[in-house]
Amino acid sequence: MKFTHLLGIGAMALTVAACTTNPITGRSSLQLANNSEILTMSAQEYKSTLNKSKVITGTADAKKVVNVGSRIKSAAERYYQSIGRSADLANYNWEFNLIQSNELNAWCMPGGKVAVYTGILPITKNENGLAVVLGHEVSHALAGHGNERISQAMVAQYGGAILGGTISNAQWANVFEAVYPIGSQVALLKYGRNQESEADQMGLYLMGMAGYDPREAIPFWGRMEAASKGARQPEFLSTHPNPETRISDINKDLPKALEYYKAAGGKI
């Protein structure tokens, strides 16, 4: 792992100490930020977003979002418990909400704060398609991608100051707000290609663990790609791998995902 703004032996020690390994994919990432602070700020921003939005409740679609999200969440909790890492999710306070918006989008903030926009539902079509979306978005949170992006921003902006612990609360808040530009739509944390690919892989496994057919990921992403043609690309696709790479990677990950699906009672 290379971080050109961290120099010297102390920096190397910090990098090693802050490397976190994803228990599902095995990928390592630098996560310097304080997770408790991230969760607190995420909860505040999520509440603010809901207050500014038209949240749909009580409908069949709203119930479907909660149902599918709950199954994905429960599958993750079972898996983390099975490997002795339940503590990783101890501070999560899951919420699944459907928001009225024409955007083809969904997101999950750190701590399990999930929103699905009504505009994406015609693309998901059914619970399997929705499981592709929620598995992917929940994976961003579980993998600590928010912490990773914040850490990258901290290193880029403040470099060696991080080693001396001289980052102020105001500077920390500025980094968080830069990574999560909530005021202009939360949607809009820009993950990197590696993080998007990891969320694809991890999400595929989670939906299988939850009893959803991971083979449905291929037609779903095809529908998403088709929906973006001839128009401004949806935020949901803006930093994702190109379609050919995505489908190729999904096909490589499908055998293991199908094992999880079969173990959850799915028919192969």
Image (spheres, helix red, strand yellow):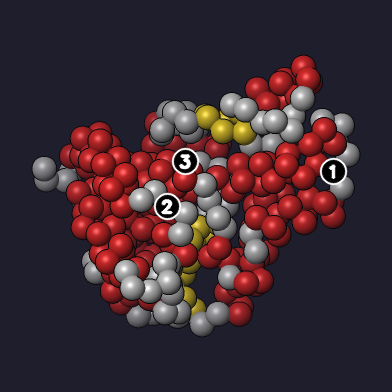
Taking the spot 42% from the left edge, 67% from the top edge, the residue there is 233
Mark 3: amino acid: Asn
Q: Is residue 215 above or below residue 62?
A: above
Q: Quadrant of the C terminus?
A: top left
Mark 2: amino acid: His
For mark 1, what is the residue?
167
Taking the spot 77% from the left edge, 45% from the top edge, the residue there is 157
Spatial CA distance of label 3 from label 1 is 27 Å
In the displayed structure, does residue 41 sit left or right of residue 100?
A: right
**Callout 3: few (<14), some (14-19), or many (20+) C-alpha neighbours within 10 Å?**
few
For mark 2, what is the residue?
240
Please tell me whether mark 2 sits on a helix, a strand or a loop. Answer: loop
Which mark is first along the chain, 2 or 1? 1
For mark 3, what is the residue?
194
Q: Which mark is residue 187?
A: none
Q: Residue furthest left?
A: 268
Please tell me whether mark 3 sits on a helix, a strand or a loop. Answer: helix
Spatial CA distance of label 2 from label 3 is 9 Å
Which mark is first along the chain, 3 or 2? 3
Residue 70, image x and y in percent?
39, 57
Which quarter of the picture shows residue 61?
Answer: bottom left
Closest to the camera, between mark 3 and mark 1, is 3
Taking the spot 70% from the left edge, 54% from the top edge, the residue there is 176
In the displayed structure, does residue 107 sit left or right of residue 266?
A: right
